[in-house]
Amino acid sequence: MKIFLTLYVLLTSVVAHGAIKEKDFPLLEQGKQILYKEKVNANPWPRIHIYQIVDATPLETLAIFLALDHQKNYLPNVLVSTPVKHIGPTEVYTSYELELPWPLSNSHYTHASDFKKVSDTEYTAKWWMITSESAESVEGSAKFKAYKGKTLMEYHSLVKPKSFLAGLVKSSMLEDTLASIEAVRAEIKRVKKEDQSLLRKYEKVITDSLKGINAYQEIIQSLSSKK
């Protein structure tokens, strides 16, 4: 599994949802990732909270984070990411295939995602499971808020896996999730430097969706016609 060995990880046992410790802001400003783990009853995997600062605007950060058909091109272990259905302009179902560590088989699942604009300097997103071969339930949310000319990105997730072997790969799950969130930051850095047109494309998806346009409909129809 692909792991970013240079990640700085700060682990704690319990953290309130959305709360980041004041002492950790200097680490964030140095470009480090902060990870908090929260034990949830008998679930083999904890609820996780990841924080990082991204050198981009909140809109740019959200745009790449929710570039649904592009995620497979930059998220580690994601082999397929295909938007399949609009529920509303901002709510889309996306089908995925995820490579999982041995002894688990690859996971095929469909997630719903939605987002909203809180203000010109803050956006939020959420996602949840529709179907999954490997999870009983999935819930996640993210916040993208302006911070000193950049964006403070928060990621919160809880996955209840089906497999009784899931506890054996908890460390891999944490490493892979950190790598995925780091990959968002790396892809934003790349497109801002090398592929502004791609960045603007997905910014437009967000702004069109907020205007009530089903921005992924053309892609969905194109893929459906090829079946």
Image: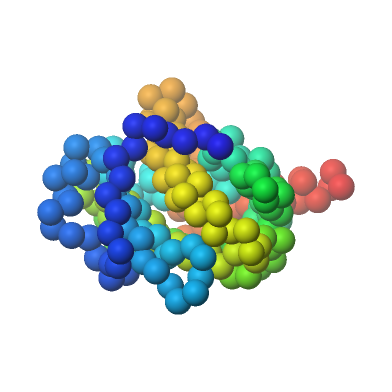
Indicate whether 70 appears above or below 154.
above
Indicate the quadrant where residue 54 lies. top left
Identify which residue, 13 or 118, lies in the foreground: 13
Residue 212 location (% of width, % of height)? 53, 63
Locate residue 14 relative to residue 225 in the image: left or right: left
The colour scheme applied to this rendered structure is rainbow
Q: Residue at x 28, y 70 (%)?
A: 16
Identify which residue, 85 or 2, lies in the foreground: 2
Residue 219 location (% of width, % of height)? 69, 47
Locate residue 18 relative to residue 185 in the image: left or right: left
Residue 25 location (% of width, % of height)? 16, 50
Considering every residue shown, the one lying at the far bottom of the view is 41
Q: Is residue 139 at least partly visible in the picture? A: no
Locate residue 11 relative to residue 183 in the image: left or right: left
Indicate the quadrant where residue 125 lies. bottom left
Q: Residue at x 43, y 23 (%)?
A: 194
Quadrant where the N terminus sits is top right
Q: Residue at x 55, y 54 (%)?
A: 168
Count of all numbered marks drawn on residues in the image: 0
Residue 59 location (% of width, % of height)? 37, 49
Locate residue 129 relative to residue 84 in the image: left or right: left
Indicate whether 64 appears above or below 49.
above
